[in-house]
Image (tube, helix red, strand yellow):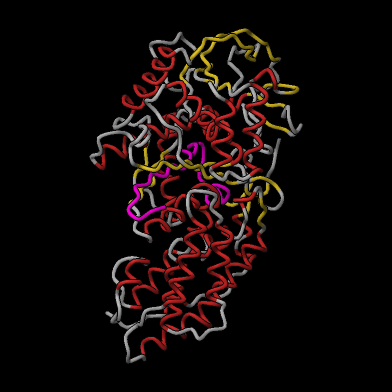
Amino acid sequence: MHIHQKVLLVPMQPTPNGRMHIGHGGGTYLRADVIARALRAQGHEVAVITGSDVYEDWVVAAAQREGRSPEETCRDHHAGIARDLDRLSIRLDAWIDPSGEAHRDAYRQLHEDVLTRLRTTGAARLESERIPFAQDTGRALVGPWIAGECPHCGRPCGGSTCTSCGEYFVPEQLVHARSRIGDSPVQWRTEQNWFATADDPGAIADRHRAAGLRPVFLAPLLRALDNHGGRVRLTGQGDWGVRSGTLPAGKVISNGYFLYSVYCGEVHRASTGAAVNPFTPGSGVTTVGLFGSDNSTPGLLVPDVIAQGSQGTLAPFDATVVNGMLNFEGHKCSTSKRHGIWLSELLEGTSVSADELRHTLLHAPLDHGPADISLNALTHHVNTLREWRTTVLRPALDRLREQSHPVRRAEAALKAAAEQYALLTPYSPDLTAAVKAFDDWIGSPQVPDAEWLVGVALLGRPLLPDLADHVWTQLGFPGEPDLRQAEQLEPLPRQSPATTADLLSAPLDPATLEPYVHLQDPE
């Protein structure tokens, strides 16, 4: 990417049916933050905008479990998720509640306008499909209300996407479909909903392949294109969602990730004073979608289908960043199954810091597929970082205080940082390779002097921002670690004496984390 690019990153909106666990934190949101920090360090103009997915049926399920209204559930968890992200040092430029007074009407209107546009162009078609209903209550069994086995890999799943292999399916393809609401028999009815299909399925695959999407994440998209030609849902059954006067009772507009992102683009346009939405063709803003591999259809297929159907009024993401699912102790982290470690409990109830948790999660190679993390691995990474801070970083900062000469230009640090930032573009990023570059630098045999500290700050900025900011300040630089500043300022006088007391931490005892570990994994 060239200097002075404008970039909008939209990590997929989390569902406010609970607080965030380490699977959320280590996947999409950490990637958005790391990439944004690396781009900013190179002088790009970057915004990260997202919000909560309040119109998901999982919210209704959580509300029933918690004994309160869906609206109360949304408000509570929306605020809680924002705190979780902040505690992990995830920086957002806007955090949107689509059901809140500031956004509700405009959010609904955007969805209705796009559906109307697709109807007008002929891209949207009303089609019949078989939908399961609970025989006793008459509730449509979609989303959290239906369970079965994936038609592709055979593993247990529900809704319309398999979290194991990323397969997308319509309800009647679910194997051994059964209700999750008691023991009510499943009754199948024929309903009509709006769908759109890709005009050119091959072009979609070619575009993502050319952009560098890794084969492991491309595979579910290719299956979707082969199995149903890129057919995507525009409306569905339900009474909790984006309602429209153009739809009959019991129908809602699909609250998809792409139109959520387009709305984030509207927020970006309004905040920057731009003439057009970043998703308008030729806007001059690079749009980046970030999501987990279980959302391949919403993230990789739907944007292209809607863009093709809009006939030039919308463009899909310019780049997509997909991450694999994070397992904890052998099972996928899950809010509904209460399996994992919750960010709020870990970062508020233990001595583990945001930097320490980020450093641990970055070692899970999610840019290449699913990965696993254990309590022992978490403890190991935290203690390794603490020992390095105590035995290497602190003495280096102590020596910095005693130096009489200013900090000199650090050529090796600048080169290492530039190479690391090249791993953190929106096109096929590799966060595990980036943290390895940081680990190699801080463990290098060279003398830990002022020039070495410049490298710690520059390579640490995207990954461990609190530590990087601390070192940068002690070196005498203003603001945040910045590649251009380090290249241009020579020499750099220190502005304040180094302080190192906050770098000391006792080793982490894994037993102190056990109360915060949730290993329940019910069906």
Residue name at image x 56 percent, y 45 percent: 212
The quarter of the picture where residue 385 lies is bottom right
Q: In the picture shown, does residue 320 fall above or below 386?
A: above
Residue name at image x 50 percent, y 51 percent: 31
In the image: residue 500, left or right of residue 229: left
Q: Nearer the viewer, residue 44 or 36?
A: 44
In the image: residue 219, left or right of residue 416: right
The quarter of the picture where residue 430 lies is bottom right
Residue name at image x 55 percent, y 52 percent: 26
Residue 155 x, y percent position in the rendering: 74, 34
**Quick one: quadrant of the C terminus?**
top right
Work out which residue is located at the far left of the displayed protein and give it: 273
Q: Nearer the viewer, residue 131 or 305?
A: 305
* Count of numbered badges drawn on the protein: 0
Q: In the picture shown, does residue 151 fall above or below 498?
A: above
Q: In the picture shown, does residue 339 fall above or below 513?
A: above
In the image: residue 478, left or right of residue 1: left
Q: In the picture shown, does residue 58 fall above or below 179?
A: below
Boundaries of the magenta span: 1-25
Residue 504 x, y percent position in the rendering: 48, 78
Q: Nearer the viewer, residue 63 or 265?
A: 265
Residue 164 x, y percent position in the rendering: 68, 39
- Magenta stretch: dominant secondary structure: loop
Residue 380 x, y percent position in the rendering: 63, 68
Residue name at image x 37 percent, y 29 percent: 99
Whether residue 2 is in magenta: the answer is yes
Q: Nearer the viewer, residue 71 or 216?
A: 216
